[in-house]
Image (cartoon, grey):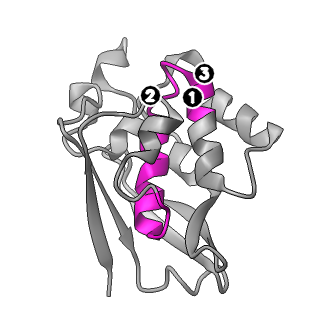
Amino acid sequence: MDIRKTFVFDSIPASLEELKKLPGAGLNDPCAAAALCALAFNAYPKDRDACFEMLNYLKGPRPLTNFDISFIKDRFMDGVDYVPRSYFAGSSPDNGYTPSVPYAITVFEGVHSRDQIGEGYIKIFMKSSGADSDRYIVLRHKPSTDQWFVWQFEGLLVGIRPPESSDPWA
């Protein structure tokens, strides 16, 4: 049985302090932590340091590595800032991945989300409006605090169809 949850945000946080005020910021729900990670990537085009600060919070005891930072910078190279917006409701290649406001992200836990990787890990999926297959993020549980922290996020930044407006041959 799939478990689907939709998280709605009035705005994209511009700082860690703003992120911490959002529902689910206690990180006790892996679905909320996954949605917050997708939301945090949307801060990168305006303030990458704030994005990295939010991601470090979401990663908990295992902060971003130099490889992680390079990977993220590479994914946003050449003005490709639309991938994280593709997780919001209302976004599509046709509208330049402009989401509806308030911002809504639906995440889901599949039948095997908790047993594919190992005990204490979970794979959470979300739909990108620019991709044919679902994307995923892996979270790791910290039993002493009952929190879920981002373990692998790379699947959220995989390339998607470019916005219609960015294709010079259209």
Q: Tell me the tag on residue 1.
A: none
Residue, x 19% and y 40% (percent of image)? 90
Residue 123, horizontal then vertical, whole percent:
53, 71
CA gap between label 2 and label 3 equals 20 Å
Disc 3 crowd rating (10 Å Cα; few below 14, some 14-19, many 20+) is few
23 relative to 19, above or below: below
Are the residues tagged 2 and 1 within 8 Å (C-beta)? yes
Q: Earlier in the sequence, mark 2 or mark 1?
A: 2
The residue carrying mark 2 is: 14
Q: Tell me the tag on residue 50.
A: 1
Q: Quadrant of the C terminus?
A: top left
Residue, x 29% and y 71% (percent of image)? 4
Q: For the residue marked with disc 2, what is the amino acid?
A: Ala
Q: Earlier in the sequence, mark 2 or mark 3?
A: 2
The residue carrying mark 3 is: 77
Residue 16 falls inside the magenta stretch: no
